[in-house]
Image (spheres, helix red, strand yellow):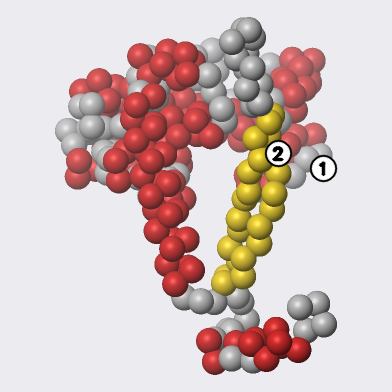
Amino acid sequence: NLSAKKHGSHFAVSHTSVEQLEEFNMDLLGRGMQRLAPKLWGLLDRLLFAGKKYVGVAVSTKGPEDSDEEDTYWEAFGDRELDGLMGVSADTASAKQERIMARHNKLVMIKKVVIFSIIMQTANQKSNAFQSIFGIFLQSAHTPQKVIETLSRMGICVSVDSINTAVMSLSKEAHHGISTLGWMLLTSYMYNNFDVDLKSTVHTADKSEDTLKHLTAGLLFPLQHGITLENLRCLKALWERSLLN
């Protein structure tokens, strides 16, 4: 059963951690799906590579003009940032074609993972690893709630409530980490005052309160270079002798 918990496709949003987000890998997820359902993976290959000679990788059947148009499309898509990750150089025409095909293969792999994930979640609602990670990404990108709800109904991401639950879990983890960091007494603190104008989208006569809010943000910086509490025993003396105090 591809959607079984033992295959690692279950994601408990109420226990979301930063470690889970950092360890998520589309390539690793795709290889696992290919290993568990090779026939379905191969079928999707043939469907997504329709119109091309299928040899397990994308093979271009386009002419020079079409190739230039496709390369322009990928550049507009923002693919330049992926060149280093794929290890493809753009020095020669052959390298240029190789770069296009590498990106094509990468996108096809992502599409196959999405299709697999939709099928798996349909069979088992708890099989939602991809949907959960993608939902958190949408939240971080300030995606409108209606868009998230639509994608959730399509099986591409989890619901808005599940995303909020995951965010709450991450907030609790961050709060615990900050508290632990403060208890170590090896931390520098920095505060910053700033103003935010929370303008209302609907202007009414009865809403006359001040929309300008005065807030304070704080940052904690762990002391580096092997500093210990013993090294900080001189701070009281330095503070007392400072001309600024």
Residue 23 horizontal/vertical position (percent)? 43, 51
Three-letter code, disc 2: Asp
Q: Residue at x 42, y 46 (%)?
A: 171
**Left or right: 224 with respect to 132?**
right
| Mark 1 crowdedness (10 Å alpha carbons): few <14, some 14-19, many ≥20 | few
Q: Which residue bears the numbered disc 2? A: 195
Which image quarter is the C terminus in? bottom right
Q: Is residue 57 above or below residue 61?
A: below
Q: Which residue bears the numbered disc 1? A: 91
Residue 193 horizontal/vertical position (percent)? 69, 49
Query: Which quarter of the picture shows residue 58?
Result: top right
Q: Is residue 160 above or below residue 241?
A: above
**Left or right: 98 with respect to 9?**
right
Query: Is disc 2 placed on a helix, strand or loop?
Result: strand
The tag on residue 122 is none
Q: Residue at x 58, y 84 (%)?
A: 226
Q: Residue at x 64, y 91 (%)?
A: 234
Residue 217 horizontal/vertical position (percent)? 62, 50
Depth check, mark 1 against mark 2: the one in front is: 2
Give the distance between the C-alpha atoms of the residues marked 1 and 2, in whole angstroms: 49 Å
Q: Residue at x 17, y 33 (%)?
A: 1
Query: In this view of the protein, which residue sits in the foreground, 109 or 155?
Result: 155
Query: Is disc 1 placed on a helix, strand or loop?
Result: loop
Whichever of callouts 1 and 2 sits on the residue coming sooner in the sequence is 1
Three-letter code, disc 1: Asp
